[in-house]
Amino acid sequence: MIRLLFTALLCVLASSQATAQNWLSQALLELNEGQRNETFTYLLRDSNAKCDRVIRTLFNGSTVELDDWEVLCYHAGNRTHRIGELP
């Protein structure tokens, strides 16, 4: 019985999708991986961050009013970015 409950819990957790606190992160989650990487590449270039190309993004969850994203750049390594609600 416990094994069945544990299996059911794993299935629920595996099928649940991360939810974002704000509309921008929610829109990013709806993009496919290539589109999301390209979007972050342009966002980082506009902010003068040293990132030539984003090769991976990972939504890490939400804190109070911010969404945490981990971004892996081709030559610059990992970066963590927090996205808050835009006015």
Image (spheres, rainbow, N blue to C red):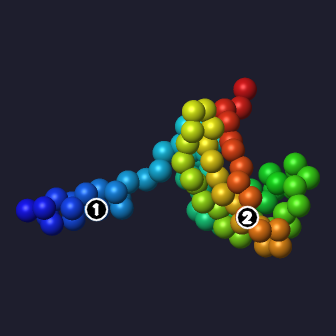
Q: Residue furthest right?
A: 48
Q: Residues within 10 Å of mark 2 (few under 14, many from 20)?
A: some
Residue 7 vertical position relative to residue 28 in the rendered view, above or below: below
- Classify mark 1: helix, strand or loop: helix
Which residue occupies 63% across, 38% down? Answer: 66
Q: Which residue is mark 1?
A: 11
Q: Is residue 48 above or below residue 75?
A: above
Q: Are marks 2 and 1 in contact (CB under 8 Å)?
A: no
Quarter of the image where one finds residue 38: bottom right
Three-letter code for the amino acid on which mark 2 is drawn: Asn
Task: Select label 2 or label 1 by which is in front.
Answer: 2
Q: Is 39 on the left or on the right of 31, as rendered?
A: right
Q: Position of residue 53 (x, y in %)?
A: 80, 68
Disc number at residue 78?
2
Q: Is residue 27 visible?
A: yes
Residues at marks 2 and 1, CA–CA distance in whole angstroms: 30 Å
Query: Which one is in front, 28 or 20?
Result: 20
Q: Is residue 27 above or below residue 38?
A: above
Q: Looking at the picture, which amino acid does disc 1 mark?
A: Cys
Residue 57 position in % (x across, y down): 65, 62
Choose the circle earlier in sequence order: 2 or 1.
1
Q: Residues within 10 Å of mark 1 (few under 14, many from 20)?
A: few
Name the residue at the front extreme: 2
Horizontally, residue 46 falls left or right of residue 17, namely right
Residue 44 location, quadrant: bottom right
* Along the line of sight, the residue nearer the viewer: 4 or 84: 4
- Residue pictured at 29% horizontal, 56% vertical: 12
